[in-house]
Image: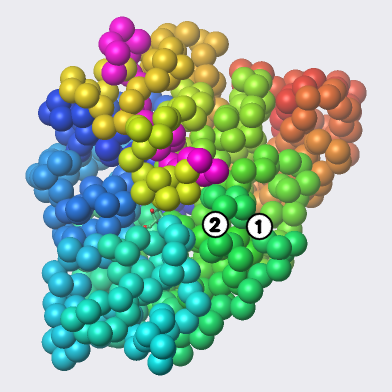
Amino acid sequence: MGVDADWWRGAVIYQIYPRSFQDSTGDGIGDLKGITRRLDHIASLGADAIWISPFFTSPMKDFGYDVSDYCDVDPMFGTLSDFDALVARAQELGLKVMIDLVLSHTSDQHPWFKESRRDRSNPRADWYVWAEPKGDGTPPNNWLSIFGGSAWQWDSRREQYYLHNFLTSQPDLNFHHEPVQEALLDVVRFWLERGVNGFRLDTINFYFADRYLRDNPPLPKELRNDSIAPGVNPYNHQLHLFDKNQPENIEFLRKFRAVLEPYGAAAVGEVGDAQRGLEIMAEYTSGGDKVQMCYPFEMLQPTRLTAALLEETFARMNAVAPDAWPCWAYSNHDTVRHITRWNLPEAAARSYTVLLMCLRGSLCLYQGEELGLPEADIDFEELRDPYGIEFWPEFKGRDGCRTPMTWVTDNSNGGFSEGTPWLPVKAPHLNRAVSAQDADQTSMLNHYRRALAFRRAHEVLRTGTLSGLRAEGDVATFVRGGEETIFCAFNLGAEQAHVGLPEGTWAAIGGELGATAAIGGEVTLGPWGYCLMRKV
Ligand code: NOJ
């Protein structure tokens, strides 16, 4: 059988945060064997692929996003043969496996960095972004770290600063240096040979920093669009012209794509940029020669996805590249779970799920979202995330969305672990465990299953066009076109609304999802109601 090179198009990708999915050893931390044991749950949901957040060797200062060996599994998560077993089981279940590559930086414990920091003349001296201090000893420029403070850390051996966009223990690799690119592409090959089907690329737009290390200009308050830590992070006070988003990245992404091609593998890049995220996503995914998909932060913001925001999002993206391929998500391991973030009543959460299934693009679901989990309430003493510890209490960090998955109700850890979980399991999550929802046809879990089945049953939702997207008050309407034509209307508000159908004859679909049928060319949508009609 040939490779289906287009498997990723419109796919539903289920994100696993390995520390918190399933523990199989009793140490309170999830692991690869645990994931393998729970893959049936993901298959029963109807997902096409999994994305596993980093499980590589790491000192875990940023819980795996600080890698000290790209080609091995951290003992806390298991072994390479556990990984092989995971891939084999996923294949049996028809699930593609995507792993999370953190290429823009390593851990300061990576042998490359240990060598690089030794002196200025070692073979890896140029592998990281090193720079001279200013005459007065201060950092080379005004760049800031997302996790707080300057993006530059002094190293007394080299008597130079090194760049870190995140923690000081996450030094940035120097992508201007060819051997760095080659070494990273070898990592990509290593995992492809091991059978992975693709990658999630951490901070894909951070790979290159400006060659000349120019200062970022300030960003006036009225233009700021804070995403993860609104208001509290001075990182948002700059226009990030020079510390990321550099044009050289395009050529690297082409090289990366060429490595993927023979394997039929696909990648989804994370584009973190409060101003131009959508445009960069469109740029990186257009033309079929860079990455297949990217996710911007438009639907991961504190502000709710309104009809108007949806319209604006698609318009901006199409203005750059109509062939852009986004990967939409409402929740992930970096942001407050969307039910809490957007303060959604149950009916609204269900409506947003169906909306996601109807969008053009691929989709990511974050573990526990299918259970309708709210953000866990974490006390200061329970915090583990360095980002949260830095900005507490204005920003509480990312632990509230990283607490363990709950599988059963009759165990205080939700069946996640026989030991003490690394983050607590809170009561509202126990009540919503898989076992409580599995057989209940009215549960959120079964709503997600039906919603995914609906997308799968209508190929046009995965790969068709999306046109006529309009927002009128709280209502968003659009048409998906391809082998069939589907009209979608979503009332993203708590007031009743009336919608007229486009010309033609339409038949109601999606009754099993709770969609309201139109009668005589019109439909009245209740609060958070939606209507799905197929052209006949
Ligand atoms: C984005 C990841 O999603 C986040 O968890 C991590 O802290 C940063 N990149 C740094 O790698």
Asked whether mark 2 and ligand 1 are closer than 8 Å, the reply comes as: no
Image spot of residue 12 (x, y percent): 46, 41
The answer to which quarter of the image holds residue 533 is top right
For residue 36, say whether it is visible. Answer: no
Of the numbered discs in the image, which one, if any, rests on residue 510?
A: none
| 517 up-or-down from 96: above or below | above
Circle 2 residues within 10 Å: few <14, some 14–19, many ≥20: many
What residue does disc 1 label? 225
Image spot of residue 391 (x, y percent): 47, 49
Mark 1 or mark 2, which has the lower sequence index? 1
Q: Nearer the viewer, residue 154 or 447?
A: 154
Q: Is residue 413 left or right of residue 58?
A: right
> In which of the image's four quarters is ligand 1 placed?
bottom left
For residue 128, say whether it is visible. Answer: yes
Q: Which residues are magenta?
A: 393-413
Q: Residue at x 21, y 84 (%)?
A: 158
| 13 up-or-down from 168: above or below | above
Image spot of residue 282 (x, y percent): 59, 65
The answer to which quarter of the image holds residue 34 is top left
Disc nearest the viewer among 1 and 2: 2
- Count of numbered circles in the view: 2
| 129 up-or-down from 51: above or below | below
Q: Residue flagged by tag 2: what amino acid is it?
A: Asn
